[in-house]
Amino acid sequence: MRKSLLGLGVLLLCSTLHAAPPDTPTGWRAKVAETMPLLGHRNWILIVDSAYPLQSSEGIETIETNAPHSAVIRYVLAAIDHSIHVRPLIYMDAELSYVPDTDAPGATAYRYEIKQLFRDFPIEQLPHERIISTVDETSKQFHVLVLKTNMAIPYTSVFIRLDCKYWSADAEARMRAKMNASEPAAK
């Protein structure tokens, strides 16, 4: 009888565990996949360190990934690359170049890793407060998706401003020049 009850208990436990909803560590990935078709030029995707503040602007949506920083960067770059409509413009904090390993262990290794991850992209480095101000101002009109990672090194956030993939700045300049040339001179 005792063996039967033990067996029944094991079966009930197994069926309960099997029926439990799966943990969703990829919820942030689903959010990126769901949001990517809606994003366009002037939208931003931020991949930030664990101390990045929760911003209160209405246009900013923050998702906790609980994932490694580099894994989130790779996933977002791949999602952007697979899109037909946007390309990334990468911004990073200028302060990162000055963060020593003595104060933030792993900073040098992270700088090397970033060079590898973004080897095909130019990175514009600006002071942290300037980037934050730009993102804040942008969020008043355009959506900003913030993906918070488990990174614990300061000034490691990656700020990606999306731009149009199928229309370049040069094409825009040529079109504007034609428009200006065709306008009648002001009298």
Image (cartoon, grey):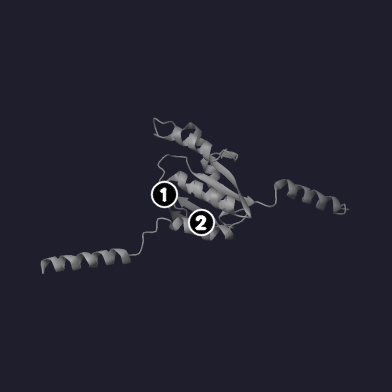
The kind of residue tagged 2 is Val
The answer to which of marks 2 and 1 sits earlier in the sequence is 2
Residue in the picture at 45% in, 32% down: 108
Q: Circle 1: is it few (<14), some (14-19), or many (20+) Cα within 10 Å?
A: some
- Secondary structure of the residue carrying tag 2 is helix
The kind of residue tagged 1 is Ala
> Does residue 47 lie above or below 101 as drawn?
below
- Secondary structure of the residue carrying tag 1 is loop
Residue in the picture at 49% in, 59% down: 31
Camera sees residue 60:
no
Of the numbered discs in the image, which one, if any, rests on residue 172?
none
| Residue 93, position as x, y percentages in the image | 52, 39
Q: Residue furthest left?
A: 1
Camera sees residue 160:
yes
Proximity of marks 2 and 1: CB atoms separated by less than 8 Å: no
Snapshot quadrant of residue 107: top left
Of the numbered discs in the image, which one, if any, rests on residue 32?
2
Residue in the picture at 45% in, 34% down: 109
The quadrant in which the N terminus is found is bottom left
User: Does residue 25 appear left or right of residue 9 in this picture?
Assistant: right
Q: Which residue is mark 1?
A: 67
> Does residue 14 lie above or below 48 as drawn?
below
